[in-house]
Structure formats: structure tokens, C-alpha cells
Image: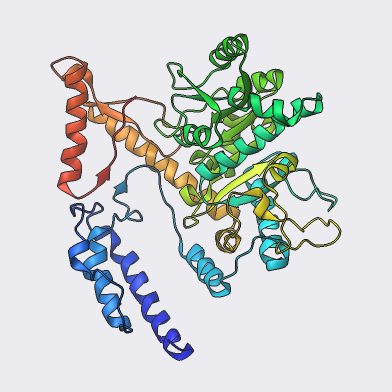
Amino acid sequence: MDVTEFRKRCKEMADFIADYYKNVDSLPPMSTVKPGYLYPLIPHEAPEDPESFEDIQQDIETKIMPGMMHWQSSNFFGWFPSSGSFPAMLGDMVSSMFSIIGFNWVCSPAATELETVVMDWLGKLIGLDSRFMSIKEDGTEGDGGGVIQGTASEAQIVVMIAAREMALGRFKSYGMSDNDIDMIRHTLVAYFSDQTHSAGQKGANIIGCQSRIIPSDANFRLTKCALQAVIIKDRHDGLIPFFVCATFGTTNTAAIDDLCGIADVAESENLWLHIDAAYAGAALACPEFRPLARGIERAHSFSFNAHKWMLTNFDCSALWVANSTHLVNALDIEREYLPRVKGATNFVKDYRNWELPLGRRFRSLKLWFVMRMYGASGIRAYIRNNVEQAKWLETQLVEDGRFEIMTPVVFGLVVFRVKASIIAGNDHDVNKTNVDLVRRINDDGRVFLVGTNI
């Protein structure tokens, strides 16, 4: 494909994408194919000779499209949103044009410096404390900063590694030998609630620490008292607490943990406090939601997914740390083929030391496009409109009389069920009725829902 054909095909693909978005609401949001549907439809080996664009396009429409869930449909209500936008797509196109592997500043200075600037933009937009910014107001370098990860799960693992580095570094400062430090690694304990995203448990498995899953309270929140009680027992048993994850907007109910109380415990117990706001963090762009997040200014790290509720195509997970020292110390590996710039400057960051992979895409471009083409006012309007829609649905369900709202509707998530009082039977019957309702709705094909168990 030469430049002339590329120009032609790009225009055709732009039309295809525009038509898809124009008509996506008319498509059934849920795929109904069976596992293994695709294998008999495509060759079992790569083609020896080139195939035409027309043939590939035909296969997209006839073979790929039937197996797609249409996440951008207004009839798709599964999980949390994956809110793409045309500006983000344009940014991704430019990123693909450059096709860099931007593991450090030398690879492409603009890629590193734009990420530094845009992450400060984003942090200020959601009201983060200045300690999370890369650049201070006077233009000098700060201790903290932001970096774009692939997912909130990656962010969780990265900060757990940094937390381990901080905890073990403290023992080293006491004069403990490397051998003795290695002996205590298995006694490190991380803390989560039973509502924390599964990434927490996965992170503990990966870094080789112990973990505690603490029961949440009646409002599905991790509380100060529950956390403190488990830590006291673990210390009595000779274990070393080192990390706690609090959640701003849990996956099941969008509950908000006791952030201030958990921060109190983290400070008194020398724990790294990470706040996972994967979904609800975007709401902090609207000042009216910030009182709900008191306590995040005391965290060591904070993350949310711009690809969930801030109009930025996957993948774009924003992570900030208040001090990058432990992160860099834990992940920095020096090799002669990874050149460094002589002399530290504010914008020379080797982001390879802020994440698990070495290579990284130019993801800040799409976030830059979104923030410029929507503006802060457009992003806030989008989020507020979603919340208004959720409030409208809550009202409709309550007025119907057959449903009950299970948790307060604060953001864009509505958790409801058929009232137990109108179902003859026990808890099993109530659950079965609601599971069947979700199945019947999805079988109908007009909308797609996901149920949960709380």
C-alpha cells in the first residue's frame, strides 16, 4: 500500500467508522455468537499472497461484526462505560502515524514532555493536590507526577511494587542486611476490602506478598475500624503491613471507602495508601463531587481510567504518585542501550521506570486531543449529563413501584432489583427472580445489562 492508496483507504475507513456510529444504536448491543464461531469462518494459516482491502473490509462486516459487543451503543449498560470519542480517535491516528516506542525522553522528546504536561492538566482538572504534579507553580520540578498506564490494574501493580520498595527500604535504613530483607518479603501484607477490584488480589499474587480481604460495612465501604482491627492482629502474628487500597467508586455499587479514616491508619502504620478511582475519578472534574473525595490529598498514589468516563478511547489509565522516588528505584534497570540525558531537567522523565513494560505508545496525544477539543466545560457537561440520566432512571424505577434502589445513586451507576416484598419465597427465590430478569432483558436483545450480587 503506497501513500496514494493509503489516502484513499483512510477516507473509506473514515466513512465506515462514521456510518457505524451513526447506526450503532440500531444494532443489537449484545453479540449472540457461540464460542468458537470464528474459527471455521477464516483460513487456518496466514495468506501467502497479499489480499485486497475490499476482501478484508468484507470480512470485518460479515465475520467480525457479528462477534462484537457494541460498547458505544446507547443501549449498552454492561459493566462500566468505555467512553470513546472522535477527538480521541484522531489522536490515536496521529500516534499510529509516529509509531514510536517511547520508553524515555531521548526516543521522542515531545512524547515524554506532552505526557508530563497533559497529566498535570488532568490532575488540576480533577482537583488533585499540588503534591501530585510534576511541575510546581514556579516551574521547578516536583517530587510527584502523573503517568499514563494501560489499565488501573497495571497502576495497582506498579504502586504495590513501589510500596514494597518503600517498606523494605525502611528496614534497610535500620541496618538490616539484604539477606535478612529477603527473608521478610513473604511477611509483607496488603489490605483490600471485599469490594476492591480483583486487580488488588492479582497484584498481591504477582509481587509475592500476603493479602487480607476485609469485609465491608453495610454501605459496602472499607472502614477505619475494620482495617485497624485486622492490622493489629497481623502485627501480633509477626507480619508486616505495608499497603492498603481504598476505592473511590467500587465496581459493584460505586461506594466510596472511608478515605479519611483509612488515611489515618495508613499514616499511623506506615502504609502506602493507594486510591483506586478507576470509574468515579472522572467525576472529580465537576467540583460538586470533590467533597466526596476528602482524603485523597493524603494518599501516596491515585488512579482513574480516562477511558472509562472521560471520552478517551482505551487504553488510557491515569496514575499519579506524590513522590516518584520509590517507584523509580524499584523499576529502574540500567543498560547501555537505554541512554540517559546528561543533567536532570524538569521534563526529562524516563517513563519506562514508572510502569511495567519498557516500550510505550504515544497515548498522551489522544488525551490532549480530548481535553482541547471538549475543553473542561465540555467534559463536565458530559459527566453531569450521565449523572442526570442515572437520576432519571432511579426516579422511573421508584415510580414504577416494583423495584427498589439498593445503593444511593451518586454517579452514573444504578443498582436495583425487583422488590423482595412482591416475590413469594425466600432469598434464593428473590435472587433467582432478578437473575432471570437480567437474562430475559438480554435475550430480548434491545438493551444489554449486567447483574451483580451484593
Tell whether 153 sits left or right of 392.
Answer: right
Q: In the picture, residue 405 is in which quadrant?
A: top left
19 relative to 341, above or below: below
Quadrant of residue 443 within the rendered picture? top left
Front residue of this view, candidates 204 and 148: 204
Q: Which residue is drawn at 39% across and 31% down?
A: 252
Q: Residue visible at 48% across and 52% down? A: 307
Image quarter in which the C terminus is found: top left
Whole-percent x, y for residue 95 in the image: 55, 69
State left or right for residue 251 relative to residue 266. Answer: left
In the picture, which quadrant includes the N terminus?
Answer: bottom left
- Which residue is farthest left? 424
Q: Is residue 385 visible?
A: yes
Residue 193: give x, y in percent of width and height: 48, 24
Give the x, y percent position of residue 229: 56, 10
The image position of residue 42, as x and y in percent, is 22, 69
Answer with the quarter of the image where residue 388 lies. top left
The residue nearer to you, when weighing 448 against 7, is: 7
- Against 413, residue 90 (above or below) is below
Asked if 17 appears above or below 210 in the picture, the reply is below
Which residue is drawn at the image coordinates 30% and 82% (left, top)? 51
Residue at (66, 58) in percent of width and height: 115
Closer to the camera in the image, 90 or 67: 67
* In this picture, residue 398 sits left or right of residue 296: left
